[in-house]
Amino acid sequence: MANDVVLEIDNITKEFPGIVALTDVSLQIKRGEIHGLCGENGAGKSTLMKILSGVYEYGSYRGNVYMEGEEIKFTGESIKQAIAKGIAIVYQELSLVPKLTVGENIFLGREPHNRGIINWDKLYAETDSLLKKYKLEIPFGAQVGNLGIGQQQLVEIARAISEEAKVLILDEPTSALTEEEVGTLFAILKELKANGVTCIYISHKLEEFFKITDTITVLRDGMVIGTLPTTEATVEKIISMMVGRVMKERFPKGNRKPGETIMEVRNLTAYDPNAPGVKIVDDVSFSLRRGEILGVAGLMGSGRTELVTTLFGEGGVNVSGEISVKNIRADIRSARGAMANKISLVPEDRKALGLIVNDSIIKNISLPNLDAFSSFLRINKNEEYKMCQKYADDLQIKTQSINALVTSLSGGNQQKVVIAKWLMSSPEILILDEPTRGIDVGAKYEIYKLMNELAEKGVALIMVSSDLPEVLSMSDRIMVMHERQCAGILDQNEATQEIVMALATGIRK
Amino acid sequence: MLRSIWNIILRNIKTFTMIFALGFIWLLFSILTQFGFVQPENLSNLFRQMTIISFLSIGMVLVIVTGNIDLSVGSVTGFLSVIAAFLQYYVFSSLLSGMLPTADPLLVGAISTVLTIIVVVATGVGIGALQGTMVSYLGIPAFIVTLGGMFIFRGGVLAITQGKTIGPVEESMKAIAQEYTSPLVGWVIAGVAIALIFFGILWRRRQKKAYGFELKPMRFDILKACFFSVLVFSYVLVMNLYQVMGEFKSIQYPVLLMAVVALVFSYLSSNTRFGRYAYAIGGNKEAARLAGINIKKNILQVFILMGVLCAVAGIVLTGRVGYGTTSGGDKYELTAIAGCVIGGTSLMGGEGTILGALVGSLIMTSLDNGMSYMNLGPEWQYIIKGAVLILAVYLDVVSKKKK
């Protein structure tokens, strides 16, 4: 029955400069079903949802989207248009205004009014009946900022419902919810389903798909791998669909011989600096040897970045547990302290954390290393130039002059600048957080080669990566994070994509 | 060769736009005043007038570069200025003449001035350290701390003066702001400066050669040295044409002081770790933090330097007026910020040069001076200065978008 399909996605292709995020994706969502969407980080789930919800305008992608048989083309105020068509999305990141009340947030931008004067009584009455209908025990007049994260997530869902969405997209709705709140959410979803609302449900937690969805679609590398009814699906089947790709020779062979232990981490626990009481690293222990590459795998939000920034002294607060470097207990409370222990961090987001974007290549490379060629009164600029040029040459940064602005470089070369900056401080422990994200294959290969060379020289490397083949091929051991804890540490020869994914999704303990 | 020069101009388009704007303003005023504006007498005044704002602009560049702002500099300058006058008139004059009853009054005055300078600079350091601590270590936004400071130190001015003018101050104090070198000394200074320019450029070439770096063609560097030398030479030439009651004057003391301060801060901003860190903090605070930079300390240091420069400005202000007045330094903060911004400093932080701030201050002062020369009413002066500020930033925004 053709009119059974509420939303049809037809041959969508979306390209970003340098990468293809979605290739010929076609998908049919049936009315009243809960359709699960799963895939690894970067499989294209979020991109697809952004097209449906109007974040990417019509024309920025190829292909068509049909809502109830009618083609939709969102342009201009496209998000508003998507809502008008009945497509609402609840994002992973909260998009509420913390200083406003629950009611104000739910009706933000469409307050009931009479000639521009807001009818507060009506607003709160409607909020109240909405919350009651879905059995949400949230006071309608409370300031959203004072609610817990889980309750905020529920408010956000309530807002989407109140927009009378026909298709509700939930992007990782349970990542911040407690067990009980997840139960509430599932009850709401069932209620909505009974009312004929369609749901697209994205999650990293596989077991949830089996509890709530009717159909599961697996995306991988921007393509639809398959759609199957949940009743026919098994965990093993889904995981193999998520990861099952052919491994190519994308990784240079290294000749690494891990040596003695250089760093020992025991029961490391740290809390969120902005939300005291929330653990961002939970009781993590591991050791690191000279000349080895330790891969850190895990899904988005599993606490990988938080772990490495905490090791670098710039992550969580109220840190407990023990870090020792070369058998000496290291009390690392700042980047400076980490550098004193010969630890360097190439951070995840190079634009936000790695580079001074308005500055030249040379100034970026030398920034943490100025002490090496400065006296109190003077930076020896010639020495600076010589050293920076050496590292730029070693890493083959492609530029006419190191005096050029970093913004004149490609992504891969910008990443090399960040790596050069931290190599110059001659670290013994080098942490790389997503070192190859958003750079082309050639530049990736060069970075892998460099990592091998460093390890062969005896540097201990920690590499956080969302790219499973990368982690599996480049690491001597792989630590898998799940819910801010270490779910397991695997040797390279025992690790497979399936096992890593099972640990990362909490299927396997 | 021409192409390379063109490239240099393109790369420093901001600086050249400013210089072009300055030239345009001067030309306009020259025509409107039948060339009275560019007579040695007026130019001598113009440069003397710009000094106080320049001191503040120079410090303000660093404050803004770190992503902060200092609204208190006008009040602090006024406060330090009346402290200087108070010390000279009420404290040191009687104290010193009691201790040295037989000494030459001019010598006593000079000692008084030296002591005053020490106390005022120390107070400036203290004020800078206080405000800097509140901004960096206590985490109160700079806008608020210095807005508060603006009120508090204006109150301080009134507390010290009790609403009355204090003075007169010693002749030696006045000399700092009002006197000139003799024409001969002027030429000597010009000669030394030009020699240093050439020596500096050749020395740098030699250093680079020792490192085995590729050198630009010699004629480039010579051309650059000549350009700056001509600037210095023509400045002294024009200043030496100025005469008061038949006596030829030369370089103004406060301009000499300004040149020294500007050179020191220019060096500080580009050749020391302190300066590099300031730009990095303003450019990307998170990246700077991850690079191990002590952000709080750097911002504190910047505010302390701002305090020192307020002290310098306050001393020159006292010397210029000869008294400590209740309205001293009023609204200087706005002119100083305007000077920085016109000179290419970005309020977003991370961008701005001392040289730019000097040119910006000169533009602001030229507008003041030129419009006063034309006897334009104060209402028009305010309106035009405000419009020029907005226009300058608009041009900057447009040029950035094109990039």
Image (cartoon, coloured by chain):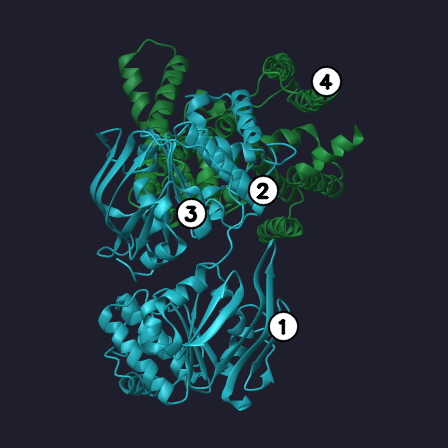
Chain colours: A cyan, B green
> Residue A28 has which mark?
none
* Above-or-below relation of A153 to B203: below
The reply to whether discs 3 and 4 touch (Cβ–Cβ < 8 Å) is: no
Q: Are marks 1 and 4 on the same chain?
A: no
Asked whether residue B67 is in view, the answer is: no
The reply to whether discs 1 and 4 touch (Cβ–Cβ < 8 Å) is: no
Q: CA gap, disc 3 to disc 4?
A: 53 Å
**SS of the residue at dot 1?**
strand
Q: CA gap, disc 2 to disc 4?
A: 30 Å
Q: Are marks 3 and 4 on the same chain?
A: no
The residue that mark 4 highlights is: B218
How crowded pointer 3 is (Cα within 10 Å; few <14, some 14-19, many 20+) is rated as many
How crowded pointer 1 is (Cα within 10 Å; few <14, some 14-19, many 20+) is rated as some
Q: Amino acid at mark 3?
A: Val
Asked whether residue A210 is in view, the answer is: yes
Q: Nearer the viewer, mark 3 or mark 4?
A: 3
Q: CA gap, disc 1 to disc 2?
A: 46 Å
The residue that mark 1 highlights is: A63
| Foreground pick, A440 / B32 | A440
Chain of the residue displaying label 2: B
**SS of the residue at dot 4?**
helix
Q: CA gap, disc 1 to disc 4?
A: 60 Å
Quadrant of the rendered image containing residue A498:
bottom left
Chain of the residue displaying label 1: A
**SS of the residue at dot 2?**
loop
| Foreground pick, A89 / A396 | A396
Q: CA gap, disc 2 to disc 3?
A: 46 Å
The residue that mark 3 highlights is: A471
**SS of the residue at dot 3?**
helix
- Write the residue at 42% across / 14% down: B106
Image-based side of A177 in relation to B3, left or right: left
Q: Amino acid at mark 2?
A: Gly
